Image: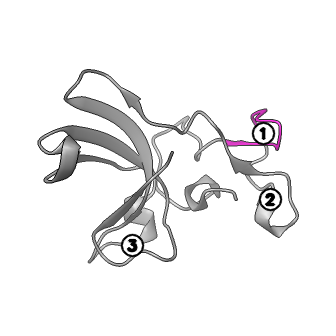
Amino acid sequence: CKPSCAWSGKASLAGGSTPVTTCDKSNNPLTDVNARSGCDGGPAYQCSNESPWAVTDKLAYGFAAVNIAGGSESSWCCACYELTFTSGPVSGKKMVVQATNTGGDLSGNQFDLSM
């Protein structure tokens, strides 16, 4: 599907900035921010480059669907967050994510990492 933050007007962006880029089914970037989501019969999908990558063994960057209690979609979209993992094999490691989607099934203060 097209990430929710890819729609025009979802967030206040710096001058010259555009919403989250979308791609067609062959992963070619689209220039029309108003292209319908592939989930609704349109050509727009999340691009495959929205995958996480490691910077060091303790830090990674990535993208996520976000829902922050007390906020709104306009405050989450395109914002960046530093996450610290607290359990499992990644305990103590950090990840900086950019919110590219709102994840309609998320509760407050949840992050759904893009893979």
**Label 1 Cα crowd, 10 Å radius (few <14 / some 14-19 / many 20+):** some
Residue found 41% across the figure and 39% down from its top: 62
Left or right: where does residue 25 sit relative to residue 86? right
Q: Main secondary structure of the magenta part?
A: loop
Q: Which residue is mark 1?
A: 30
Q: Is residue 59 above or below residue 36?
A: above
| Extreme residue toward the front, this view | 89
Q: How far from the left and from the top, in percent, is residue 63? A: 44, 45
Please, what is the three-letter code of the amino acid marked with disc 3? Ser
Q: CA distance from mark 3 to mark 2?
A: 24 Å
Q: Nearer the viewer, residue 70 or 83?
A: 83
Residue range (magenta): 22-31
- Between disc 3 and disc 2, whose residue precedes? 2
Can see residue 12? yes
Q: Secondary structure at mark 1?
A: loop
Q: Is residue 32 above or below residue 51?
A: below
Residue found 44% across the figure and 36% down from its top: 52
- Between disc 3 and disc 1, whose residue precedes? 1
Q: Which residue is mark 3?
A: 72
Say if mark 3 contacts mark 2, CB within 8 Å. no
Q: Which numbered dot is residue 38?
A: 2
Left or right: where does residue 10 sit relative to residue 91? right
Residue found 54% across the figure and 38% down from its top: 17
**Label 2 Cα crowd, 10 Å radius (few <14 / some 14-19 / many 20+):** some
